[in-house]
Image: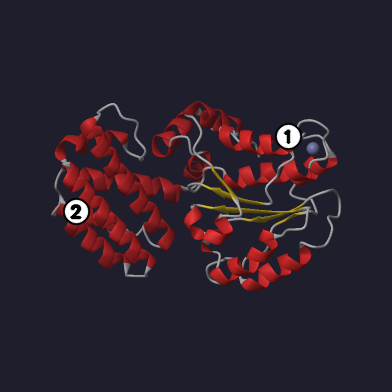
């Protein structure tokens, strides 16, 4: 897959390649859907590429194998357990495998995807090999935030942020996938230049439902209608932890947009309901927006702690109405 935008990322990788001063450990971070895995793939491909000039050249055997996810020296360690994450056993296997020379070229790349929940013992076990890696071994982690990692890991890694690309780049990426301009507009009105989230939105009815529930919730706040706010918040479509998290995140963005638009009516919206946010803007104060933000944050912590969705949403509804 092609990496759109993110010039800072590709420039940094290119300058490291050209100077020959390559780091051995990379942390690629950014919000969900923004292209972290694509960025990790680009970096891994550049590392294994045997091209003479531009790397990744996209033409050599290594690049082609990487493109097909079939390069023997690009390794995706396995996750395990309830959290679907990396444990110490996996790290031990990685540690012993990393000293074995590459099959095919000069580099061996380990990609730990979605490493947000990587366990501390696993990180501690990784330290040694990250401190003194074999010359040919590289480690790439992707995560939504750098805070998942121990300071000792962070200090030995190059951290590179991935950000949503411009609306034009996002339109081009979605257009290449065959979406119509109406579909692209609908997705971008919710997720801006976040290509991954736009694709999920277009392929996943559930996400479209959550976006429309967010709009309904913001409308209820505008109308001071507690009953319809509770109906939106306790909708059966918001069922598992992931949808609760996503809904709270979208609601939080919509309220933040309203707070920003109160000061600057022409501000770009980060959330999924620009029109509703701009109608809410004159009706809230900075203090009430801040209070709603804290309540939503509290609700998301409760959701993480497995508090019943109905209870936390009821508390959130009452709190918002009193804000
Ligand atoms: Zn190549």
Residue drawn at (59%, 38%), measured in percent from left and top? 9
Q: Earlier in the sequence, mark 1 or mark 2?
A: 1
Label 1 residue SS = helix
Residue drawn at (49%, 30%), measured in percent from left and top? 166
Callout 1: 10 Å neighbours few (<14), some, many (20+)?
A: few
Asked if 268 appears above or below 240 in the picture, the reply is: above
Residue 139 quadrant: bottom right
Would you say residue 86 is visible in this rendering? Answer: no
Percent position of residue 216, x then y:
27, 46
Q: Mark 1 and ligand 1: say if the CB distance to the nearest ligand atom is below 8 Å.
A: no
Percent position of residue 218, x then y:
24, 44
Residue identifier under label 1: 18
Percent position of residue 161, x then y:
53, 43
Residue identifier under label 2: 320
Gap in angstroms between the C-alphas marked 1 and 2: 54 Å
How many dots with numbers?
A: 2
Specify the quarter for ligand 1: top right
From the viewer's perspective, tell me whether residue 44 is left or right of residue 224: right
Verify CB contact (< 8 Å) between mark 1 and mark 2: no
Callout 2: 10 Å neighbours few (<14), some, many (20+)?
A: many
Residue drawn at (47%, 57%), measured in percent from left and top? 147
Q: Mark 2 and ligand 1: say if the CB distance to the nearest ligand atom is below 8 Å.
A: no
């Amino acid at each position: 897959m092609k990496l759109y935008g993110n010039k800072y990322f590709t420039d940094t990788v290119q300058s490291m390649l050209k100077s020959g001063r390559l780091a051995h450990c990379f942390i690629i971070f950014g919000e969900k859907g923004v292209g972290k895995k694509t960025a990790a793939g680009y970096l891994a491909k550049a590392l294994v590429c045997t091209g003479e000039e531009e790397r990744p050249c996209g033409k050599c055997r290594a690049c082609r194998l990487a493109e097909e996810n079939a390069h023997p020296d690009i390794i995706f360690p396995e996750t395990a357990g309830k959290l679907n994450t990396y444990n110490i056993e996996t790290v031990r296997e990685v540690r012993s495998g990393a000293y074995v020379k590459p099959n095919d070229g000069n580099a061996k790349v380990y990609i730990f995807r979605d490493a947000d929940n990587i366990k501390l013992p696993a990180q501690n076990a990784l330290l040694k090999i990250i401190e003194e890696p074999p010359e040919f071994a590289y480690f790439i982690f992707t995560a939504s935030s750098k805070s998942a990692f121990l300071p000792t890991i962070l200090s030995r890694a190059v951290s590179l942020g991935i950000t949503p690309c411009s609306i034009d780049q996002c339109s081009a990426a979605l257009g290449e996938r065959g979406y119509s301009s109406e579909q692209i507009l609908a997705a971008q009105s919710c997720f801006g230049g976040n290509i991954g989230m736009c694709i999920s939105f277009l392929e996943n009815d559930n996400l479209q439902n959550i976006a429309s529930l967010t709009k309904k919730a913001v409308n209820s706040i505008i109308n001071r209608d507690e009953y319809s706010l509770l109906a939106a918040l306790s909708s059966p479509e918001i069922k598992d932890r992931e949808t609760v998290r996503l809904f709270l995140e979208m609601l939080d963005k919509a309220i933040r947009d309203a707070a920003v638009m109160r000061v600057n009516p022409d501000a770009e919206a980060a959330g999924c309901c620009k029109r509703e946010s701009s109608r809410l803007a004159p009706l809230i104060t900075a203090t009430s927006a801040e209070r709603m933000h804290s309540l939503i944050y509290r609700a998301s912590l409760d959701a993480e702690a497995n508090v019943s969705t109905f209870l936390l949403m009821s508390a959130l509804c009452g709190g918002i109405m009193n804000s």
